[in-house]
Image: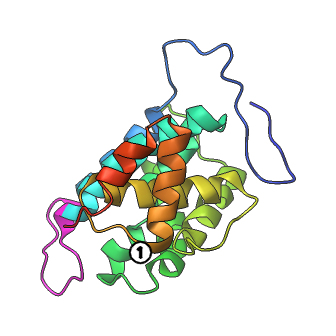
Amino acid sequence: MKIDQGKGSMKKDISNLGMNLSARRLNRILSILFSEMKDLSDEDRDLPIRWNVIHMYTSSQIAKILALKRGIDPELAGIAAALHDIGVVKTKRHKNHAEAAERYVYEIIESYNSKHRGDLPQITKEEAELIVNAIVQHSQKEIISDNPFVEILKDVDSLDRYLHGVKTEGTHRERCIKVLKELGIEENLINRTKKVSY
């Protein structure tokens, strides 16, 4: 793995890609999150907890695909995507959830490292900072960052909501169109589906 200190991208060479994608840390994080979320109530929440669970899983899968496409570490991108809305889960509010997430992300990573990882590698301090930085900035969709992890998380969040049928406008829509084109999806298909709403 090459680490690009200038942009914090942690580029991964996939030219020698085998058929074993490293996702064991991500899968453990997803298990921790699901255990914490499965019995939570929808009472007094801006969004139903089932949406957060679904969005957590589907975002992490989309993040791995885009990370492979863009040449960055798919497991770290998946972990960031799995954790990106933890602020909504913990505070029950969508407003300022990205900024509120920092504390909770560090707590979950610490829990993973100290209690749940077993024989899996730790999430390093550098990796944790990369994940937290992307999560804290992911709601600022209108700002283009030079950090590929920040950008991938913004793109994943936008595309995942679109793929779930959530009304997608403005910068969310612009990001969706960009990513769908990046993935080779025809523009006429994008234009036919632009009025999808939830």
Q: Residues within 10 Å of mark 1 (few under 14, many from 20)?
A: many
- Count of marks, rendered view: 1
| Quadrant of the image containing the N terminus | top right
Task: Using the rendered view, name the quadrant where residue 162 is placed.
Answer: bottom left
Estimate the x, y position of residue 85 in percent, counting from the top left: 40, 67
Main SS of residues in magenta: loop
Estimate the x, y position of residue 177 in percent, counting from the top left: 48, 53
Q: Is residue 80 visible?
A: no
In the image, 63 versus 38, the foreground residue is: 63
Residue 49 counted in the magenta span: yes
Q: Residue at x 53, y 61 (%)?
A: 154
Estimate the x, y position of residue 97 in percent, counting from the top left: 44, 79
Q: Is residue 189 left or right of residue 174?
A: left
| Quadrant of the image containing the C terminus | bottom left
Q: Residue at x 51, y 33 (%)?
A: 120
Q: Is residue 93 visible?
A: yes
Q: Residue at x 50, y 34 (%)?
A: 184
Task: Using the rendered view, name the quadrant where residue 50 is placed.
Answer: bottom left
Q: Residue at x 55, y 46 (%)?
A: 77
**Stretch in magenta:** 36-50
Q: Is residue 159 left or right of residue 80?
A: left
Residue 157 counted in the magenta span: no
Task: Using the rendered view, name the quadrant where residue 54 is placed.
Answer: bottom left
The type of residue carrying mark 1 is Gly
Secondary structure of the residue carrying tag 1 is helix
From the viewer's perspective, is residue 89 above or below residue 78?
below
Residue under label 1: 87
In the image, 119 versus 42, the foreground residue is: 42
